[in-house]
C-alpha cells in the first residue's frame, strides 16, 4: 500500500516526466518519422510479426505511443491500434505522423500506470523506450496484464539505463545529441529518481512478469535486428526485447 507521501512524490515526478517529453517531442518525432521512412520500419515489422498472436485484425494497445511509431507501423499491418501517452506534445506529434502516413488510430492522453480500459480489452500491449522512464514500472506491468486477454502478448522494448549517465561525454553523441544541457541534466535527474533504475534489466522485468502470470521470453539486445539505418544515431546501451504471453 502506497502512503500519501509516496503518491504525492510519484505524481510530482510524473509531471516532470510529462514536461520533459513535451519539450523533446518535436525532435523525437523527427527521428521516429525517419525510421518509418527508412529501412528500420521493415526490420521492426519482421520482429513484431514473429511474436504477435494469430488472427487479424488484432486489438493493440500502444503504451507510450510517443510520436506514433508503433501506431503507424501496426495500423499499416492491418491491426486496430489505440495509442496512449502522458505527454500532450507527443500525442500531437503522433497525430501528425499518422496523417502523414495515411493511417488512423485512436490516440488518447493517459497515464500508462492507470489505464481507462476494461479488463481483457486487448490482444496485444506494445511499448518502446517507456518503462525506464515510469514512476512505477511494477504498477504499469500489473495494469498491462489486466487489460490483456488470456493468450495475449506483451511486447516491451527498452534499455537498462539505471547505471548510465546521460550527461557523460561518451553518452552525449547519441540520441541525446542537440537536446541542450539543461534538458540533458533534467533527464539524468529524473532517471536517478526512478525505482526501476535500481534494478538490472531485463532479468528484473522477466521475473516480475512471470509472477504476474506471463510466460516470458526475451532477447538481451535487439539493436542489430532493428537498427539498420546508418544515418540514425543510437546509444550503445543494450536494447532488449521482452515477449510475454499472458497465461493466467
Image (spheres, rainbow, N blue to C red):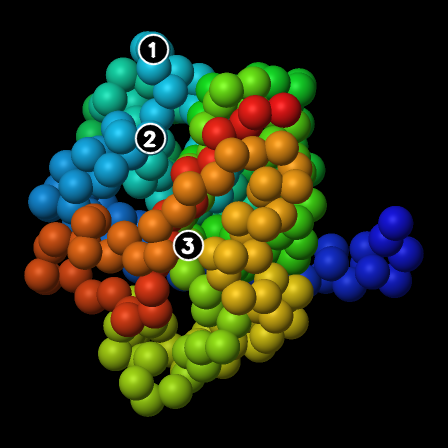
Decide which of 239, 85 is in the foreground and name it. 239
- Outermost residue toward the bottom? 169
Which image quadrant is residue 243 in?
top left
**Whole-Å distance between the Cαs marked 1 and 2?**
12 Å
Q: Secondary structure at mark 1?
A: loop
Instruction: Of the two numbered discs 3 and 2 on the same chain, state the one appearing first in sequence.
Output: 2
Note whether 154 is above or below 189 in the view shown.
above
**Whole-Å distance between the Cαs marked 1 and 3?**
26 Å
- Outermost residue toward the top? 56
Near mark 2 (Cα within 10 A), the count class, few <14, some 14-19 or many ≥20, is some
* Residue at image mark 1: 55
Which image quadrant is residue 196 in?
bottom right
Decide which of 138, 64 is in the foreground and name it. 138
Residue at x 59% of width, y 66% of height = 199
Residue 142, given in percent of the width and then of the height, sits at 66, 38
* Residue at image mark 2: 51
123 vs 95, left or right, is right
Residue 39, given in percent of the width and then of the height, sits at 10, 45
Residue 159, given in percent of the width and then of the height, sits at 41, 60
Residue at x 29% of width, y 70% of height = 235
* Residue at image mark 3: 158
Near mark 1 (Cα within 10 A), the count class, few <14, some 14-19 or many ≥20, is few
Amino acid at each position: 500500500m502506497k502512503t500519501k507521501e509516496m503518491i504525492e512524490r510519484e505524481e510530482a515526478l510524473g509531471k516532470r516526466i510529462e514536461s520533459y517529453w513535451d519539450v523533446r517531442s518535436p525532435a523525437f518525432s523527427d527521428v521516429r518519422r525517419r525510421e518509418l521512412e527508412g529501412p528500420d520500419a521493415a526490420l521492426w515489422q519482421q520482429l513484431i510479426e514473429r511474436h504477435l498472436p494469430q488472427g487479424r485484425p488484432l486489438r493493440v494497445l500502444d503504451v507510450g505511443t510517443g510520436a506514433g511509431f508503433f501506431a503507424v507501423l501496426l495500423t499499416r499491418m492491418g491491426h486496430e491500434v489505440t495509442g496512449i501517452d502522458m505527454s500532450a506534445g507527443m500525442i500531437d506529434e503522433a497525430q501528425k505522423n499518422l496523417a502523414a502516413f495515411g493511417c488512423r488510430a485512436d490516440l488518447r492522453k493517459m497515464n500508462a500506470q492507470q489505464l481507462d480500459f476494461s479488463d481483457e480489452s486487448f490482444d496485444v500491449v506494445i511499448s518502446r523506450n517507456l518503462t525506464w522512464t515510469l514512476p512505477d514500472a511494477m504498477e504499469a506491468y500489473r495494469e498491462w496484464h489486466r487489460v490483456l486477454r488470456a493468450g495475449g502478448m506483451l511486447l516491451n522494448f527498452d534499455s537498462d539505463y539505471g547505471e548510465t549517465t546521460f550527461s557523460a561525454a561518451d553518452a552525449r553523441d547519441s540520441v541525446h545529441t542537440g537536446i541542450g544541457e539543461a534538458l540533458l541534466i533534467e533527464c539524468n535527474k529524473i532517471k536517478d529518481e526512478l525505482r526501476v533504475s535500481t534494478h538490472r534489466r531485463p532479468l528484473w522485468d522477466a521475473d516480475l512478469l512471470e509472477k504476474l502470470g506471463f510466460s516470458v521470453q526475451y532477447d538481451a539486445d535487439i539493436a542489430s535486428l532493428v537498427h539498420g539505418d546508418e544515418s540514425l544515431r543510437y546509444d550503445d546501451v543494450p536494447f532488449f526485447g521482452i515477449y510475454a504471453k499472458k497465461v493466467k
